[in-house]
Image (tube, rainbow, N blue to C red):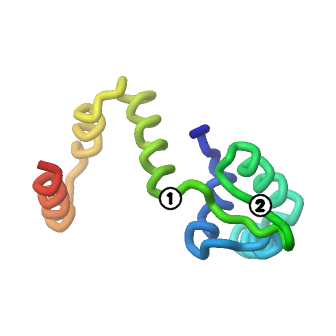
Amino acid sequence: MEKMFESELRVMEPLWEEGELSAGQLAKKLNASCGWNRNTTYTVIKKLVDKGLVERRDPGFLCRALVSREQVRRQETESLIDRLFGGSRTAFLSAFLSEELTEDEARELRELVEKLR
């Protein structure tokens, strides 16, 4: 999967939330949430279609995501770990955990580690 840019993620969010939306509905949502005009939204939709991440079909230019939010999160996380931590998940977690955690965060992490064992 190709890297997704912030603008592309903005288009994907409503599709992940609502499933299928027309290009016009997406344009209205993005105008309300971040002030985009219709042309900006349509340009980003086209880029996502060209990347194979969104399907757009007639009638009504209905759009739907072809990748899940979780797939994108995994890919983006792997990319970050590769770029900034030489592919080491241990180094990533060490840097992440160097900040002080709340009791709830520490408990959640312990539970996650136990599930992964």
Amino acid type indicated by mark 2 = Arg
Residue at x 28%, y 44% (from the top left corner)? 96
Residue at x 68%, y 56% (from the top left corner)? 54
Give the quarter of the image for residue 106.
Answer: bottom left
Answer above or below: position of 27 versus 65.
below
Give the quarter of the image for residue 81.
Answer: top left
Going by the picture, which residue comes out furthest to the right? Answer: 39
- Of badges 2 and 1, the one in the foreground is 2
- Mark toward the start of the polypeptide (2 vs 1): 2
Residue at x 87%, y 65% (from the top left corner)? 38
Badge 2, how many Cα within 10 Å: few under 14, some, many 20+? Answer: some
Give the quarter of the image for residue 78.
Answer: top left
Q: What residue is pinned by disc 1?
A: 69
Q: Quadrant of the N terminus?
A: top right
Asked if residue 94 lies left or right of residue 41, the reply is left
Amino acid type indicated by mark 1 = Arg
In percent of width and height, residue 23 lies at 80, 68
The residue lying toward the viewer, choosing from 85 and 54, is: 54
Q: What residue is pinned by disc 2?
A: 56
- Label 1 residue SS: helix
In percent of width and height, residue 86 lies at 36, 23
In percent of width and height, residue 4 lies at 61, 45
